[in-house]
Image: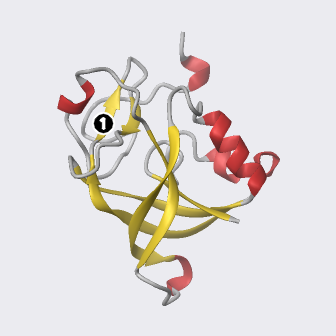
Amino acid sequence: MNHVFVYGSLKRAQPNYHYMTDSNNGKAEFLATAVTVQKYPLVIATKCNIPFLLNLPGQGNRVHGEIYRVDEKMLEFLDEFENIPTMYQRTVVELEISEWAGGTGEENITEAFVYSTTTYQPDWPSLPTYESYDSNGDHSLKFVLREDRK
């Protein structure tokens, strides 16, 4: 089993969360909420208002998200869903646990895979950055579902 940190549309209550719970994609078990130890720019970009974690450690904010334990089938699904290596890359990030599911008293620092990008438009690092993504946030940048993209 692998640990994956999601910070955008795959989080609970976000537009693509249903992919995390679809057993046809594999198994994903919610473990904890967490925040990155290092700062990263979390931006919303493209005409589809997609959240991107730019692989620029030390810039931006500590990013809040969720950690899931996933099986190999789900990891393969996520790699394809996240367009590895065209749109995102899968790297390891160090995380500080905010709250474990079920209140377990496990360690406070852990590592997990994250989908970040090194391929982006030159202006993306100057876009507003966020600590946490919500498709209905006050940024007024509504996420465009894949089936609605033209």
Looking at this view, is 64 or 59 the one in front? 59
Relative height, residue 88 to residue 113 (above, below): above
At 64% from the left edge and 40% from the top edge, which residue is drawn?
Answer: 79
At label 1, counting other C-alpha atoms closer than 10 Å, the crowd grade (few under 14, some 14-19, many 20 or more) is many
Looking at this view, is 67 or 17 the one in front? 67
Where the N terminus falls, by quadrant? bottom right
> Image check: 76 left or right of 81?
right
Which residue, given by chain and number where applicable, does mark 1 sit on?
43
Coordinates of residue 101 in the picture (x, y in percent)? 54, 76
Residue pushed farthest bottom? 105
Coordinates of residue 109 in the picture (x, y in percent)? 41, 76
Where the C terminus falls, by quadrant? top right
> Image check: 58 left or right of 37?
left
Looking at this view, is 44 or 120 the one in front? 120
Give the quarter of the image for residue 125: top left
Label tally: 1
